[in-house]
Image (spheres, coloured by chain):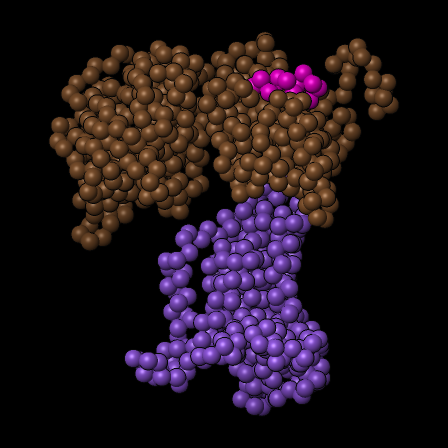
């Protein structure tokens, strides 16, 4: 593996990490407010489908992104209504949303486009194209730094850059603003927030809507930025990996970035090693390599991160005593 | 309120409008009528006590004043002006602050963050933080309520956490401060300190409303006291003109014996012997440190201590819920292995009974019917079985007998346990654990959350057990209870038994021992 290979694996790490980062940050907002969200997967999938469908019909990436956000927020509001207003079980609601999204996207895909659940191939204007950063072409031949800048940093689509920007922004919101203080408080002790004269319900709805927004962007990335159309079940468990990364990161924004990059790296290596004969082992079956990130997730979560203490009021609907 | 603007220095207190004036407050929770047409006037610049048994409606009334609940009907006036309090926000705006029984603090936050929550002073935290810090430090100075603004609240002892709650209310500009059962979590010394703070607040013109069921506190600190019973306000009297006996009678509606009469203990053989028992938990923290004592038949030994000093762990080790790390134990002269196995069923077979400290977590399955709870842990008893099946009719019959004997109200064995009051739930646990005439009886917090009438009953039952020859170990955070029940008192601090005293030991003496100051 030479230097360029390393750059290419890292480049692919960046691409693979983005949906994880966006979804994990989405989960961070929701879970910090005390609403557990196992439905990140479903919301992403709905967002991916909405983006693919609207992008195909209107040939506009921006309308596709808007549709993804709306679809995802709609599902987020369903989750909010079930778990905040109706005080239902948040896990059950999240699972239901995952099933709903999986079934509905496939069904609507069949009904609207007659392509076995896929949306039509998007035209160039329906996708977010890679952006060539200024100077990328000029420095391409500079050793070491050239490829790093032009391959690794440049030529990603807008959502990639937004995804990385979302991390410091989330950190700033959560730790430096009034909203963030209240968000963290309501996830730990909603009664303290209530008696301080702040509406627990409104605060949690805000968090859930932000979660929907970010999941929608993550979904749009999958169907209209990374690929050129929606494919059935294209989230393929990314919502759950994002959830694992969130726990791994103990619900903090910067570690979320680290965890998502790690999972993205594992995924990138798995792809890179497909069909490659390893010294002493020989060719490793594709399925084994594909399973690797998940196996490592289990191992990491089981033993290597110490105790991950969730927000104390997480998963518990807020009811005044009595 | 034009008259108020004149601010006559020598206006008689009676002429000023009361700080708080409630009229006709009514509130129901489903079928429970918690407050019935309550009238209450609280004069400005006084400490006003509200006493009543658990469930009398004190906390509900004050939660209505603070906007946490909304009254079904009635009117609230603050400083003579009618206010509409729909939420805590409205109450704070009207100058009312409340310190709840269970603190409303965010434990991972610092003191400053807790104080700022809800009144941050800007979209960005940095905008208000410096100002908030200055204001907090001014309040700390003015009211002698020192606490480090940057300390994490979860790391502070409860006494200081309570101080943070008071500071929170003052920071929001509270003129009237409501405290709901503030001393339940405090040592006697901390409680005395709190009372000094309250007096000082009063002397600086604040109005304090103190909710409690402890008559001693009412007598010690209040100027006026109102008594509630079953959702009604039964009397308001000057504290100086009343007595604990009179208040108790007003609370319960009948005469109550506050003092427990009992004959001296006639002790017999050692029933429970602990030698060098230690416990280190999974985090490596020493919870019990070389605990040794002997409990004899026919005596009650009380364990006094501030909550969290190893009392709970001691009960868990003796009752077989948890393994010890070192030490030996004998019950009725026979050794019991406490190092290699924790087996509560074995302890029960050798007639050690346990009334756990927390009846909801350990003593009862509250979603079960009362009759099912009366056999919990004894369900293998052939008396309750029909071959493989439970003998439901037999269990119910047995439960009805027990419930009558222990005066459980209502005596309905099919009622879900969660629908009984705290005192009656406790009686169900006691009935189950006491009926098999145990040799050793462990009782954790015998009367926590139990009202005065039931306390009297439970104490009498324990004395009767003792006189029948049982060896009884009582753990309680209520010093009054420890002193009136026990024949001997062991004081625990930091997992060790640091002293033994007789029941005549004064509260001050025990209080000092509990904090580990005196030896």
Depth check: give the residue in front, A84 or B53: A84
Give the quadrant of the C terminus of chain B. Answer: top left
Residue B17: image quadrant is top right
Is B101 on the left-hand or right-hand side of B444?
right
Q: Residue furthest front?
A: A143
Magenta stretch contains residue B201: yes
Give the quadrant of the N terminus of chain B. Answer: top right
Q: What is the span of residues highlighted in magenta in the rendered image?
A: B195-207
Secondary structure predominantly adopted by residues drawn in magenta: helix
Residue B442: image quadrant is top left
Depth check: give the residue in front, A232 or B220: A232
Depth check: give the residue in front, A184 or B435: A184
User: Could you tell me residue B492's position as x and y percent?
Assistant: 34, 24
Q: Residue furthest bottom?
A: A114
User: Could you tell me residue B478's position as x and y percent?
Assistant: 41, 23
Does B397 appear above or below A170?
above
Does A297 appear above or below B101?
below
- Identify which residue is drawn at 55% across, 21% down: B194
Depth check: give the residue in front, B332 or B266: B332
- Identify which residue is drawn at 83% across, 21% down: B4
**Residue A67 visible to an observer of this rendering:** no
The picture's colour for chain B is brown
């Amino acid at each position: 593996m030479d230097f360029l290979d390393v750059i290419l694996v890292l480049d692919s790490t960046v691409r693979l990490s983005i949906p994880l980062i966006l979804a994990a940050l989405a989960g961070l907002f929701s879970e910090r407010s005390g609403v557990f969200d196992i439905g990140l997967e479903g919301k992403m999938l709905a967002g991916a489908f909405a983006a693919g469908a609207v992008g195909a019909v209107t040939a506009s990436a921006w309308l596709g992104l808007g549709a993804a956000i709306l679809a995802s927020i709609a599902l987020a509001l369903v989750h909010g209504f079930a778990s905040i207003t109706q005080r239902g079980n948040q896990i059950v609601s999240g699972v239901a949303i995952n099933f709903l999204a999986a079934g509905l996207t496939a069904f609507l895909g069949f009904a609207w486009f007659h392509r076995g659940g896929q949306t039509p191939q998007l035209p160039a204007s329906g996708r977010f194209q890679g952006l060539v950063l200024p100077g990328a072409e000029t420095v391409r031949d500079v050793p070491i730094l050239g490829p790093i800048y032009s391959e690794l940093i440049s030529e990603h689509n807008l959502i990639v850059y937004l995804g990385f920007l979302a991390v410091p922004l989330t950190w700033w919101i959560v730790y430096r603003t009034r909203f963030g203080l209240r968000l963290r408080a309501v996830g730990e002790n909603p009664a303290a927030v209530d008696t301080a004269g702040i509406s627990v319900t409104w605060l949690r709805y805000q968090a859930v809507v932000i979660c929907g927004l970010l999941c929608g962007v993550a979904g749009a990335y999958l169907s209209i930025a990374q690929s050129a159309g929606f494919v059935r079940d294209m989230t393929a468990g990314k919502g759950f990996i994002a959830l694992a990364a969130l726990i791994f990161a103990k619900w903090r924004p910067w570690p979320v970035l680290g965890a998502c990059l790690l999972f993205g790296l594992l995924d990138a290596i798995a792809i890179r090693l497909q069909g490659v004969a390893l010294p002493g082992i020989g060719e490793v079956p594709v399925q084994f390599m594909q399973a690797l990130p998940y196996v490592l997730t289990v191992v990491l979560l089981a033993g290597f991160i110490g105790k991950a203490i969730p927000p104390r009021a997480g998963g518990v609907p807020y009811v005044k005593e009595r | 309120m034009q008259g108020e603007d004149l601010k006559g220095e020598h206006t008689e207190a009676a002429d000023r409008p009361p700080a708080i004036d409630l009229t006709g407050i009514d509130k129901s929770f489903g079928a429970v009528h918690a407050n019935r047409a309550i009238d209450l006037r609280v004069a400005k610049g006084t400490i006003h006590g509200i006493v009543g048994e658990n469930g009398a409606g004190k906390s509900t009334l004050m939660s209505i004043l603070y906007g946490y609940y909304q009254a079904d009907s009635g009117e609230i006036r603050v400083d003579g002006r009618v206010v509409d309090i729909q939420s805590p926000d409205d109450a704070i705006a009207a100058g009312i602050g409340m310190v709840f029984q269970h603190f409303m603090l965010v434990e991972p936050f610092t003191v400053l963050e807790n104080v700022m929550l809800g009144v941050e002073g800007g979209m960005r935290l940095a905008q208000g933080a410096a100002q908030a810090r200055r204001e907090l430090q001014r309040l700390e100075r003015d009211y002698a309520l020192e606490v480090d603004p940057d300390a994490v609240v979860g790391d502070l002892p409860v006494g200081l956490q309570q101080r943070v709650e008071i500071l929170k209310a003052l920071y929001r500009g509270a003129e009237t401060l409501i405290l709901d059962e503030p001393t339940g979590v405090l040592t006697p010394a901390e409680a005395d300190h709190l009372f000094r703070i309250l007096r000082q607040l009063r002397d600086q013109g604040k109005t304090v409303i103190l909710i409690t069921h402890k008559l001693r506190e009412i007598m010690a600190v209040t100027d006026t006291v109102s008594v509630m019973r079953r959702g009604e306000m039964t009397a308001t009297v000057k504290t100086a003109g009343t007595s604990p006996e009179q208040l108790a009678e007003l609370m319960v509606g009948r005469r109550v014996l506050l003092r427990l009469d009992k004959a001296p203990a006639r002790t017999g053989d050692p029933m429970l012997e602990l030698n060098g028992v230690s416990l280190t938990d999974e985090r490596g923290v020493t919870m019990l440190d070389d605990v040794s004592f002997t409990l004899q038949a026919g005596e009650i030994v009380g364990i006094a201590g501030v909550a969290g000093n190893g009392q709970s762990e001691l009960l868990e080790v003796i009752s077989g819920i948890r393994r010890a790390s070192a030490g030996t134990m004998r019950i009725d002269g026979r050794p019991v292995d406490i190092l290699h196995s924790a087996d509560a069923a074995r302890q029960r077979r050798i007639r050690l009974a346990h009334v756990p400290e927390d009846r909801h977590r350990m003593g009862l399955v509250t979603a079960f019917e009362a009759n099912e709870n009366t056999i919990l842990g004894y369900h293998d008893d052939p008396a309750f079985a029909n071959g493989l099946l439970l003998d439901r009719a037999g269990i119910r019959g047995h439960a009805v007998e027990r419930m009558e004997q222990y005066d459980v109200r209502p005596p309905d064995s099919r009622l879900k346990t969660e629908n009984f009051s705290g005192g009656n739930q406790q009686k169900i646990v006691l009935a189950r654990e006491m009926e098999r005439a145990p040799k050793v009886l462990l009782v954790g917090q015998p009367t926590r959350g139990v009202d005065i009438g039931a306390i009297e009953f439970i104490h009498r039952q324990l004395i009767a057990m003792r006189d029948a020859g049982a060896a009884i170990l009582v753990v309680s955070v209520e010093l009054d209870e420890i002193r009136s029940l026990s024949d001997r008192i062991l004081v625990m601090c930091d997992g060790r038994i640091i002293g033994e005293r007789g029941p005549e030991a004064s509260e001050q003496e025990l209080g000092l021992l509990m904090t580990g100051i005196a030896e």
